[in-house]
Image (cartoon, rainbow, N blue to C red):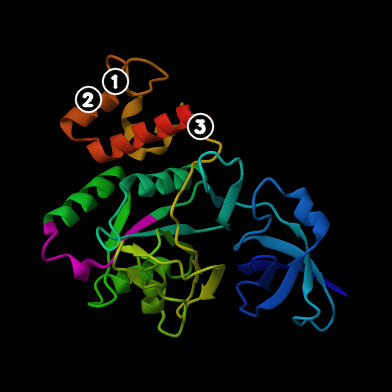
Amino acid sequence: MTEGTATVVKNAGSHYMLSPLPEWAPFPAILRGKTRLSQCETTNPVAVGDVVQFVAPDEISQLHPAIITRTLPRKNYLIRKSANLSRQSHVIAANLDQAVIVVSLYFPEIKLQFLDRILVTCEVYGIPAVIVLNKTDLYRAEAEDQIEHFVQIYSSAGYRVIQCSKVTGEGIDELREACKDRLSLFSGESGVGKSSLIKAIDPALDPKIARISVSHLQGRHTTSMYEMYRIQGGGFLVDSPGLRGFGLVDLDREEIPKYFPEMLRLSDKCRFTPCTHTHEPGCAVKEGLETGLISPERYNSYLGMLEEDRKFR
């Protein structure tokens, strides 16, 4: 038997693939029962991106896989609650350099509160976020004003927004450069085109690609597991299943405004501390809402998170 350290590059239920990054040499592994029980506060005790210790036979195979014995401390991770009433949480990926959040104004139609929940969680766990506005070829001619408005909202908040289309090639080089030499999680709602973008970044890769349900204009789940890919030119991408919900985890309502960067920039000018930015006089955030420094869409997302916390806590 040999011992070693490697990174989880694929999670398919109870089976994993590990690789000694930055070397790309995946091999199969399973999780020791004792380790599974000791980390049961989440639905998945080990996530893609985790660095783990393992023991393995001299000849590793599917019949004789390595055994994960310990997960090393994470520098960060992206976590969500799958349902508001559920106490269980799910770690999407760990030890990330950035999260690439893919959205589309239409096909499927964007849900800004869903996007803002992911952004808040990235802020909580110290993960830089890049927003990709995908499928621009499908609606640019009819929705140029809506595109400009969306970009303005999130650029003003402090986020980088890349407009992309795999059909026209718009933004693909910029996105490829943004992912170079980084470990990037691609996340978003079902059907927004995450897997198609990954293939556009590196045509040698072959993630599953979704088709849109015409009757509901929603994506069908095609990625059923979390998997990391090595991309040509340097860097690694994590493809994740399309999400239909994103509940916040372990975040008190008083803390929520700290994770809206545009609110945080103004909050020290509020008359009262702490300030909920809802009813207090002399609130700089509410003044920013009136003057255009805070977008109504982002502020409404914030109010929704406060209400959600009050309802389900």
Q: Amino acid type of disc 2? A: Glu
Is the residue 56 above or below the residue 256 in the image? below
Q: Residue at 11% of width from left, 66% of height from top?
A: 141
Query: Earlier along the polypeptide chain: callout 3 or callout 1?
Result: 1
- Residue at label 2? 287
Report whether 44 appears left or right of 272: right
Q: Residue at 48% of width from left, 75% of height from top?
A: 234
Spot occupied by residue 114 in the image (x, y as percentages of width and height): 38, 48
Q: Would residue 108 be counted in the magenta stretch?
A: no
Query: Earlier along the polypeptide chain: callout 3 or callout 2?
Result: 2
Spot occupied by residue 44 in the image (x, y as percentages of width and height): 65, 55
How far is disc 3 from disc 1 in space, using C-alphas? 27 Å
Q: Residue at 61% of width from left, 78% of height from top?
A: 24
Residue span colored magenta: 130-144
The answer to the question of whether label 1 and label 2 lie on touching residues, with beta carbons closer than 8 A, is yes
| Label 3 Cα crowd, 10 Å radius (few <14 / some 14-19 / many 20+) | few
Kindly indicate the quadrant of the structure image that contains residue 285: top left
Mark 3 falls on what kind of element?
A: helix
Q: Amino acid type of disc 3? A: Phe
Please tell me the numbered disc located at residue 303: none
* Front in this rendered view, residue 48 or 304: 304
Please tell me the numbered disc located at residue 312: 3
Kindly indicate the quadrant of the structure image that contains residue 27: bottom right
* Front in this rendered view, residue 128 or 214: 214
Spot occupied by residue 184 in the image (x, y as percentages of width and height): 47, 63
- Residue at label 1? 283
* Front in this rendered view, residue 154 or 300: 300
